[in-house]
Image (tube, helix red, strand yellow):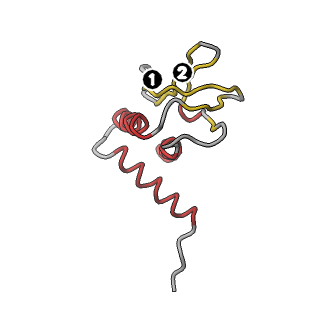
């Protein structure tokens, strides 16, 4: 008799489905990064408070780095704007709506090597 799927397994399967959705019909790494950018823009509610290297910031949105196509988080702190890798943001308090998309991006990067 099968029991209920463990919560971690459900979360892993959900992240796997999100990755598939983000990179569908994307063949190059650049196209896949663009797919994740679209997903993050559509699903993650910005702005939201976060931490980057231990500092409090507000994440205002996401964009692709023009030099090396990767998703960057556009952050503001003390009236200045900074761009950091989307993987370097940490939740400050409750994660924003759609935060699991950032986790899916992190997982995709780990598996894409």
Q: Is residue 81 visible?
A: yes
Q: Residue visible at 54% across and 79% down?
A: 3
Q: Nearer the viewer, mark 2 or mark 1?
A: 2
Which residue sits furthest right? 54
Residue 32 location in percent, x, y? 37, 38
Q: Residue visible at 66% across and 31% down?
A: 51
Which residue sits furthest left? 25
Report the front residue among 47 and 90.
Answer: 47
Q: Residue visible at 42% across and 20% down?
A: 66
Number of other residues with Cα within 10 Å of mark 1, as a class: few under 14, some 14 to 19, many 20 or more: some
Residue ID for mark 1: 65
Report the front residue among 106 and 98.
Answer: 98
Q: Is residue 57 left or right of residue 102?
A: right
Which residue sits furthest bottom? 1
Relative to 72, is 87 above or below?
below
Report the front residue among 97 and 37.
Answer: 97
Q: Is residue 39 left or right of residue 83?
A: left
Badge 2 or badge 1: first in the primary sequence:
1
Residue 62 location in percent, x, y? 46, 28
Residue 95 location in percent, x, y? 59, 42
Number of other residues with Cα within 10 Å of mark 2, as a class: few under 14, some 14 to 19, many 20 or more: some
Q: Is residue 52 left or right of residue 42?
A: right
Number of the label disc, if any, that sits on residue 13: none
| Marks 2 and 1 close (CB-CB < 8 Å) | yes
Residue ID for mark 2: 83
Local SS, label 1: loop
Q: Quadrant of residue 7?
A: bottom right
Relative to 49, is 5 above or below?
below
């Amino acid at each position: 008799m099968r029991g209920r799927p463990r919560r971690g397994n459900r979360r892993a399967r959900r992240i796997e489905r999100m990755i598939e959705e983000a990179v569908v019909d994307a063949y190059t790494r650049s196209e896949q990064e663009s797919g994740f950018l679209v997903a993050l823009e559509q699903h993650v509610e910005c702005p939201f408070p976060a931490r980057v290297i231990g500092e409090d910031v507000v994440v205002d949105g996401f964009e692709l780095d023009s030099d090396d196509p990767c998703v960057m988080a556009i952050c503001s702190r003390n009236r200045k704007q900074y761009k950091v890798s989307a993987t370097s943001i940490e939740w400050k308090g409750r994660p924003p709506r759609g935060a699991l998309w950032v986790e899916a991006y992190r997982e995709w990067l780990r598996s894409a090597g």
